[in-house]
Amino acid sequence: SDDEAYLATKQENSVGGVFGKGGTAGSIVSGWDRRSTNLTPKWSGWFNELRNNCFQLLGLLSAQRVIFAPELAHIYPQLVSVVANPEHLRSMEHRHFTQYLKQFIEILMLCTPSTLYQSHLTAILGPVFEHIQYRLKYTWDPIIGNSGLSMESTKPLGSDNCAQIANQLSSSGVESWLIAYYARGGLFVGDLDSVTAEAAVEKARVELTRTFSDSIQSVLALKGGWALVLANKAKEEQAMKRNDPSKLAAGPRNRVSETDGPVNADGTKRSQVDLQLDARKLARIDKLCHFLLLENEQIAGALVVTIIEVSEN
């Protein structure tokens, strides 16, 4: 949409935003914007929000544990057949897949009861992680020079070259079409100028990778609320090792403690209830990490290989 194109250029809102000087209004469908009576430039925004609403509902179902209710067990296989369908996953644009990861998959992993990992996570995470490995590979291969594709074949898909490229790829098969699709960030940039189009594709590529990285860090307790639990545990071990209980009441050096009792590693107050909650969270972290990395060959294989490839590149 015009708004997404504007955000890709990282311009200041102080100049009037999409409709201001240097804005991108009317750039995707040349001469028409969402303030016009023509519905065409509005469709992309509507469909995008409709798709995001579906992902948000799935995230709410997971966060509130509705999806794990015994009353819904008989329809769970139907849900899996839709949300983890390989063809559906492969055909998503990057911008839609990032929302799928952020608003549904990450929440699902964090909220699934440990006793239901095998029955409720395996069927979804297996296809999803295998697809992420595939998508990231062909998204970044043209950039690091491993794809064998020419620079021309990775240019953003716009109104001027769309028909030509479609004709070329139609006889190459689905696999070749997908490789070119991911190389272009899964975007159609319409009538955008070449500089803004390149920025939009680059933003989609980086956002996909960042979202995957953030999700994995969250479920492995490397960031977010669970990371604080591990930081507290490390702090307790350090206090025991040095036989210095005062460490438990000491926050970070760059923060003044506002309490005389135990504090978290980030300096916030830590009550007895927090201690009990941390114990439960620690057990969840241990079980989820064990499940992701050791219990299922399909999930662990795709996840570990993807992390290695991302780290190397």
Image (spheres, rainbow, N blue to C red):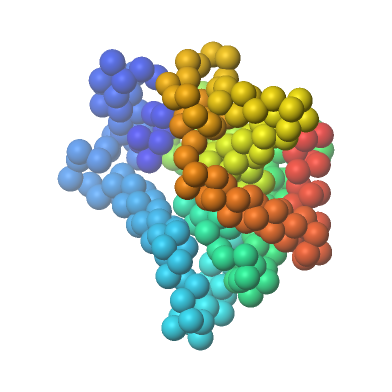
Q: Residue at x 22, y 47 (%)?
A: 38
Which residue in the rendered view is the most extreme toward the left? 37
Q: Quadrant of the C terminus?
A: top right
Residue at 29% in and 47% down: 42
120 or 191: nearer the viewer: 120
Which percent across, then down, holds residue 47? 36, 55
Q: How far from the left and from the top, in percent, is residue 149? A: 76, 40
- How many callouts does the rendering have? 0
Residue 177 in percent (x, y) is at 66, 54
Image quarter hosting the N terminus: top left
Residue 179 visible to the viewer: no
Can you say whether 85 is above or below 16 in the image? Answer: below
Q: Residue at x 81, y 42 (%)?
A: 308
- Taking 112 as reference, is 72 above or below it? below
The quarter holding residue 113 reads bottom right
Question: In x, y percent, where is residue 136?
Answer: 69, 45
Q: Is residue 59 left or right of residue 127?
A: left
Identity of the residue drawn at 65% across and 55% down = 283
Q: Quadrant of residue 15?
A: top left
When the figure is inspected, residue 17 is found, relative to residue 113, above or below; the finding is above
Q: Is residue 23 above or below residue 301?
A: above
Would you say residue 256 is visible in this rendering? yes
Instruction: Please name whichever residue, 103 or 268, is drawn nearer the observer in this view of the structure.
Output: 268
